[in-house]
Amino acid sequence: MDFGPYLLLASLEGAVGAAVLALTAVGLSLVFGVMRVVNVAHGEFYMIGAVVAWFVATTVGTHPALGFVAALIVAPLVAAIIAIAADRLVLKRVNYDPEATIVATIGILYIIQQAALMGYGPEARPVEPPFNHRIALPWYDFAAGEWFYPWGLGTTSYKLFVIAVAIVLLLGFWALMTRTKVGLVMRATQLDWDMAQAFGIPVDRVYALVFGFGAALAALAAVLIVPIQQAHYLMGGDPLLLSFIVVIIGGLGSVRGTVVAAILIGMSDGIISVFFTPTLAKIIATMVVALVLVFRPQGLFGTKAA
Amino acid sequence: MSAAQKSLALHLGLIGGLFALAFILPTYHHGNFARIMVLATYAIGYNVLFGYTGLLSLGHAMFFAAGMYGMGLAMQYGGVPALPALFLGIIAATILAAVVAVLALRTIGVAFMIVTLMFAQTGFLTILYFGEWTRGDEGFVLQQKVRQIAGLDLSDPMTRYLAAWVLFSVALLATARMMHVAFGGVLVAIRENEERTRMLGYNVFAHKFAAVVISGAIAGAAGAAYGLLFGYVGATFASVQYSIFPLLWVLLGGAGTTIGPFIGALFMFYLIDYSSGLTSAYMLIAGVALVLLTLFARAGIAGEIKRRWAPWLP
C-alpha cells in the first residue's frame, strides 16, 4: 500500500482510539476538576465496563445488538454504583486529602482488578459487535487519474458508529454541564466548594454523583471499544495512562482542553503506533507529559494554574 | 537511658537479632529473610524521601531498576566483576535520581506524584524498548560463577543472607545517624512546614535535592544487591507495582520511623507469600491493606507504637 492510503487507514484507527479516549479522559477530568481527586482507579472502571459488557452480552445472548444495548445501560450503572460506594466508604472518610486519596485509589485499583481476576478470570474474551459491515474506501490514483479501491484500505461500520456515538455523548455531556441545573451545581462546586455549600448545595452528594458519573463515562467508553478489543482484567492500565496524559496536556480539570488533547493524543498515538512501535509512541508521550507538568503545569491549553 | 541510647540499643538489637536468625531460621524462612532485608533497604531509601521529607514519589521503581540494570548490564555485557558492578549500579541510580530531582522538584504535591510516576513509566518502557539487551519482561539470569565478591559465592544461602544483612545494617544505621544530625532535622522541618523552613534561612531546594538523591541511591543499592544476590535482572522490577510496594511497606510499618520500613516489608512479604498460596489474586491483599491503612492507621505499626507506648521511638 502507498503512503497516502496507509496514512488514511492509520488516521481512521486513530480516530476510533481518540473517540474512546475522549470519553474516558473527560470522566477523569471531571472528577479532578470538581473534586480535586486524582483517581488512579479510573482505568479499572473502564475495565469493569468491558467485563460487565461481556457478562451482559453472554447472558442476553439472543441477538448481539440486544446484548449491546443492554450493556450500554447496565455497564455504566454497575461502574457508577461501585464508584459511589468507593466514594462513600473511602474517599469521603479521608476528607479528600490529595495524597491520601491517591494512595486509597491505588488500593481500590488493586481491589477491583484482582476481584475481576477472581470473578472473571485471566482470559481475554471478545464481545460480538451489534453490526459489522466491511466498508472498502476508495483512493484517487493520480498516475492513472481514476478512483480505485486499494487492497486493505477499509474500515467497518461499527468503527464509524463508535466515533459517532462518542461525538453524540460528548455533546450530550457538554449540554449537561452548561445547560442544566445539575451541570450548574457541578460547576459551582468546582469553582468554590465552600461557597457552594453556603448556598445550600449538598456538596457531599455532588461529589458522590461526580465520582459515579466519571466512572460511568469510562465504563461507557469500554462498552463501545470491547467489540473491537477484548475484555481482560488488566485492560485498565493503558486507558489510565493515556487519560492521565490527556488530562495533563489539556490542562488539569479543563473539560474543553481535555477533549482537544484527547483528539490530538488519540490520533497521534494511533498514527505513530502504525508507523513506529507502540512502545516508542508511549515513551515519547509519557516523557512529554512529565515535562509539560514540570514546565507548564497549567497544561498546554489551560489558562489557570492547577 | 536517654532517648538516643534507647534508639541505638533498638537498632543494634534489631541488627543483632537478624544476625542470630541467620543460624536459627529453617531453610525456607532463611531465604525469605534475605529477600526481606534487601527489600527493607529499598523501603529505607523510600522512607528518607516520603517519611522524613514528606515527598510522596510514585516512581521509585526507576531507581531500584537503575541500580539493578546498572549492575546487571555491566556484568552481562561489560564483563565487570561483581563488586565494581554493584557500585556502577549505585552510581547509575544516583545520577538518575539527580536528573529526576532537578526536574520533578519544580513541582509539588499531586504534580510531583504524577511526574515521578510518568518518569518511572518512561524508564519501564525504555527497558522494554531496548529488549534486545535488557531482555524485557523475560529478564536475564546472572551466572553463578560471576556472582562472587572476594571469593565468596553470593549464591550460597548463608553468604547471601549475611550480604543482605550487611546491606540492611549499613542502610539502617546510616539513615538513623542522618536523622540524628542537623541535616535530618531540616528534612523533617520541610515536611512539617516548607515555608517556615525557608523563612528560617535554610536552602529548601538543596535539602530536598539531597533527599531525592540519597533516597534514590539507597533504592539503587537495594536494586543492585537484589539482582546480584538472587541472580536475576528483569523489567518487572521497573513496573508501577514496584513503585507501589515501598510506599505500602513504609505506610504499613510507619512512615518517618527508622524501623518502620523493615516492619512493613516483613509483614507485607509474609502476608503476600501466604495469600499467594491461596489465590493467584494476591495483589488483592496489597489493595485492601492500602485502603485500610489510609482509613484507619495513617501512622502505620511503628507509628502507632510510638504514639501509644514509646514516644522515644526514632
Image (cartoon, helix red, strand yellow):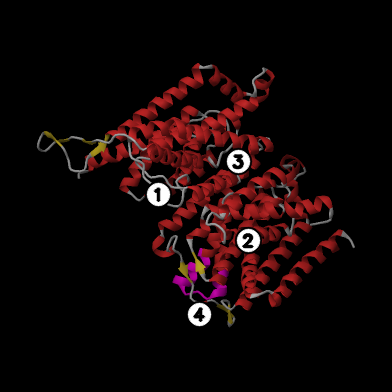
**Amino acid residing under circle 3:** Val
Q: Label for residue A285?
A: none
Which label is found at residue B269? 2
Q: Residue at x 31, y 47 (%)?
A: A275
Q: CA gap, disc 4 to disc 2?
A: 29 Å
Q: CA distance from mark 3 to mark 1?
A: 34 Å
The reply to whether the C-beta atoms of the residues labelled 1 and 4 are less than 8 Å apart is no
Across and down, in percent, residue B74 comes to 49, 69
Quadrant the N terminus of chain A occupies: top left
**Which of the numbered marks, if any, corresponds to residue A124?**
1
Q: Evaluate whether residue B193 shows in this view.
A: yes
Residue B74 magenta: yes
- Mark 2 to mark 3: distance in Å? 28 Å
**Disc 1/disc 4 C-alpha distance (Å):** 42 Å
Residue B308 part of the magenta-drawn span:
no
Residue drawn at the location 57% of the way across and 67% of the way down: B226
Of the residues shown, which amino acid type is indicated by label 4?
Lys
Local SS, label 4? helix
Left or right of B265? Residue A243 is left
Same-subunit check for callouts 2 and 3: yes
Dot in front, 1 or 2? 1
The disc numbered 3 marks a residue on which chain? Answer: B
How far apart, in angstroms, are the residues tagged by discs 1 and 2?
A: 30 Å
Instruction: Using a 10 Å C-alpha cutoff, classify the residue at mark 1 as few (fewer than 14 neighbours), some (14 to 19) or many (20 or more).
Output: some
**Residue B40: x, y in percent?**
66, 62
